[in-house]
Amino acid sequence: MDRVDGPAKVTGAARYSAEINVPGTVYGVLKSSTIAKGRITNIDTTAAAKEPGILNIFTHQNLPKPAKTPKQIEKWRAAQSYLPMQDDQIQYAGQPVALVVAATLEAATQAAALIKVTYQADTPIDSYHDPKAELFDPQKIQQGKKDGHVVRGNPQQAFDGAAIRHEATYVHAINHHSPMEPAATLAVWEGADKLTVYEASQNVTMHQGNLAELLGMPREQIRVVTKYIGGGFGCKGSFWPHTILTVLAARAVNRPVKLVLTRPQMFTGVGHREDQEQTLKMGATADGKLVSIVHSKKATTSPWDNYTESNGKIMDMLYACPNYSTVYELARANVMTSVWMRAPGEAPGSFALESSMDDLAHQLNIDPLEIRLRNYADHDHSSGKPWSSKSLKQCYTRGAELFGWNKRNPKPGQTRRGNLLVGHGMASATYPVHSSQGTARVRLFADGHAVVEAGATDLGTGTYTVMTQVSADALGLPPEKIRFELGDTRLPTAPGSGGSVAAGTVASSIMAAAEDVWDKVVKMAVADKKSPLYKVKPTDVKVELGRMFLAKDPKKGETLLAALGRSGQPDIEGSGTGKYGAGYEEKNFGQNGADQNNDNKEKKSGGHSMHSFGAHFCEVEVDPDLGTVRITRWVGVHGVGTVLNLKTATSQMKGGAIYGIGAALMEDTFRDPNFARYTNADLAGYHIPVNADIPEIQVEFVPETDPYINYLGVKGIGELGMVGVAAAVGNAIFNATGRRMRSLPITPDKMLEALRLPA
Amino acid sequence: MNNFSYIQADKAKEATAAKRDDKSAAFIAGGTTLIDLMKLNVENHDQLIDVNMLPFRGIEMTKNGLRIGALERMSEVGEHPLVVQNFPAVSESLLLAASAQLRNMASIGGNVLQRTRCGYFRDTAFPCNKREPGTGCPALEGDNRNLAILGTSSACIATSYPGDLSVALTALDAVLTLENAKGKQREVPITKFYLLPGTTPQKETVLEADELIVAVTIPQTAAARKSKYLKVRDRSSYAYALASAAVGLEVQGGLIRSARVALGGVGTQPWRCSEAEKMLVGKAPSEAVFRAAAEVALRGAKPREHNAFKVEMAQNTLVRALSEVASL
């Protein structure tokens, strides 16, 4: 099925948050700090205030205080806990120092430029590799939500005693999400106690909750709306300064205020993937079986938060390895808090893990695919649990077949095409199922249409489309008779688009709400003399594709609409809560899931470990004289449970590969070591792939059934497609050149340097 | 971006006189660099003088070579049969630059005056000797990966012209026609048009305040007909050159009669390699000969922390370009 929102998008009828127009709207423009550390000594707004139509210029001196700052909020649901413009302190370059509100965008922009801010600058710390930086052990990461130390077995001892030992360090540049649609807020107050915010948000509930806490208002007085998103990749799934500043300013000027970050401000306004390096020690037996993985990571964090991606997760569970440990070390620098970016943890983690596996294969003269099969995890070694489903072997087999892996020359640097060296590489992909739940409402009208509602969001990946399909199937209606509404806190609470949970959770929620409608209509039917199901026990009735029938005698039955029509009621409404992952399993299979025999003492809730899996295969051409790398072929095969829509799912997996190719070959934000300020903060300087960088990408899904995960057996796919991509590229480069590239992105300068050194 | 007034000039004199009378004014043609820098507050002009209506158009062969009106668009010139046939390096340099949308807007005169992509120049939060003389050059110890290794000074290491076209024009001895407010025209070889940064990196060309580029003329030569522009960059399109080479060879009887060599992405200006050309003349084309010339071309390079790779990359780019032109 084609995208239901396609026509609205190509005709411009779809309004993104910044395109919403409310009468009386005025425009906010942020002025950002030029220095990275120090304090503001003076702000001169004289010239700025003379611009026409200025309503107000907010600085730390006159910005109305929120009821609470993030630090005072116990359940702060965002990556960064620091709210700028509360005092004269500067902690990072690009930190907001003033907000101009004017009648026109032009006047606000010009006034912002005319504000003269005087600073007393201190020497900033730019990153964890700054000599002034001090690495520390955070114990816990991500606002204390995750352990900073994980140990299983006796990893160091096992490594020391291993027949084969491999140790390497991998470096990952700063990456920025760079969605096409910038961050945007339109804050509309109706009186002092009612607020509507049109926000470019991946999670309207999260925005509502944080705003309620900051403003000291009841949640229900705040409405957050996001109808369309032009990409987010994680940066719109957190709560950032521009939103609260806009809301406070709108209340003060008593007008709707619209603020859209400029592209340079997008580099210091909505987080980033942190600069980091990982050291991975891998011990194996002589025949390539892993005995130990010892992982550590160093990364830069902000002056306030201990955010860092948890790269270790994937190393703990992807292979059958009995001993494992990870530890995180952070250094505070004058940067804003980094944040989850597509496949947080798994993306850089898989680069290290899957590059080292390739090295190990080469060292032992084993095919890269074979070494993965020798270490295939039949259950999740990190938890001891069985998999709810896993089709990685099938992905390997099918991917290898589609790619022609058996034609690969295992000897590096042997295959030439004209001036170019050709190489083939592969890597595994996996992403966990993050347990989640949400609610939905279904209203079935007797005239044969339905309105289905859930406060989820659509990143542009297809939530509108797949939820329309799910609703149509549940009610037995054609898709064009379904109106699916999302992106509004007035709708039933649903999770945001993040952590690949939207499809699995919202689909489940809609099914639960549809079941509620079924139950109500079945009750009507069994009490209705005119129904073929009259006097039948409701528990004996099944519903499929909008038709109720006697389970024992399917011919005996009628449609939901037939029964509803006779009742004289114009419509009927149902609602329900759907669960995704462990919660669904617990509800439907009991505390331990179906796996009652599993006696592993360490297992947590739920009986199964839930992950999606996949495999990437690619071909690269490396120009040995110029250092350029081109990807010439790509095959991705994935096992993701039920595929709701092949078209949107395929697009998403292709997008994942492209996003990964960007990180692998070009994405790199440079932070000046002396100024702790970015030097390439725009899309001409920060390179993301163009069409010419991307070959034909072949995507397939292997058939997979997962009864434990949710009602429809759907696993999330948003992040999976990116995991392992950089490693597959690096592995293909190794096959092409005999050079192992351990620093992302693999740009021509690094490639040339590696080629100059002996293989 | 500051507020500015806008006038559309119907006659060249009107434009150049307005510019002479207003030191803060700027000419605007395609605006692809100018508006960008104004939005960044790197350039602040109180008046823009639109020159698009002026008659500096046309692509025609003259006795001095191919004359291209300065207001012709990059895409028109790059695709023009006379350019494709007689000056392949020029065509390639235009079509490998920017994006299709930018090439449709940007004028030839404006392209020649394109300004550096140095991140310190483009962000007013940083000191920059080119933007604010005397404030310093953070690129020396900072992000210099994209910056120059030839022609640098302690005040500036920017690739002052970051584009492609002028590299090809420099190799092929193009001549710029400039016209001032008195209506007087003068001709300046492109090799004399750009200035080294020295202690005055803010002064980038010999163009006077009231002068407008009205045409570019490229002499028709055998080397120009057998020319090539090779560009190396971080992605396959829409990226500035890390290194590029514009070369032309005239080979007769197995020997190089004349050679044209210029490099882009490595010099503070489009970098003509006269010594390398001299080395090539009289020799039979071979990789060894090209390699030796490439080493000479990069002699005197002053690489810094992040751009040391450019020495080798530029040499290899040059060897590859020469090899392809010589069909080795």
Image (cartoon, rainbow, N blue to C red):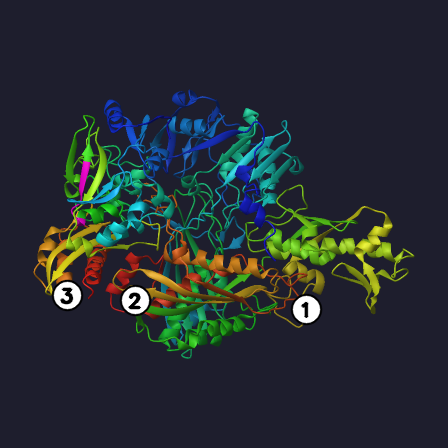
The residue nearer to you, when weighing A719 against A606, is: A719
Label 1: chain? A
Label 3: few (<14), some (14–19) or many (≥20) C-alpha neighbours in 10 Å: some
Position above or below: A727 against B277: below
A700 is higher (above) or lower (below) than A480: below
Mark 3 on the same chain as mark 1? no
Q: Nearer the viewer, mark 2 or mark 3?
A: 3
User: Residue B164, image x and y in percent?
Assistant: 26, 48
Amino acid type of the residue tagged 1 in the rendering: Ala
Q: Earlier in the sequence, mark 2 or mark 1?
A: 2
Residue identifier under label 3: B286
**Pick the front one: A685 or B127:** A685
- Tell me: B23 left or right of A324: left
Examine the image and state in which quarter residue A251 appears: top right
Which quadrant of the figure has residue B12? top left
Q: Residue A67's spot in the image, x, y percent? A: 57, 32
- Which residue bears the numbered disc 2? A420
Q: CA distance from mark 2 to mark 3?
A: 20 Å
The residue that disc 1 covers is: A594
Asked if the residue at tag 3 contacts the one at tag 2, i.e. Cβ–Cβ closer than 8 Å, the answer is no
Q: Residues within 10 Å of mark 2 (few under 14, many from 20)?
A: many
Identify which amino acid the numbered label 2 is placed on: Leu
Query: Please, which residue is most extreme toward the right here?
Result: A529
Magenta region includes residue B173: yes
Which residue sits at x=41%, y=26%? A111
From the top left corner, tell me how far across and down residue A442 is, in percent. 73, 50
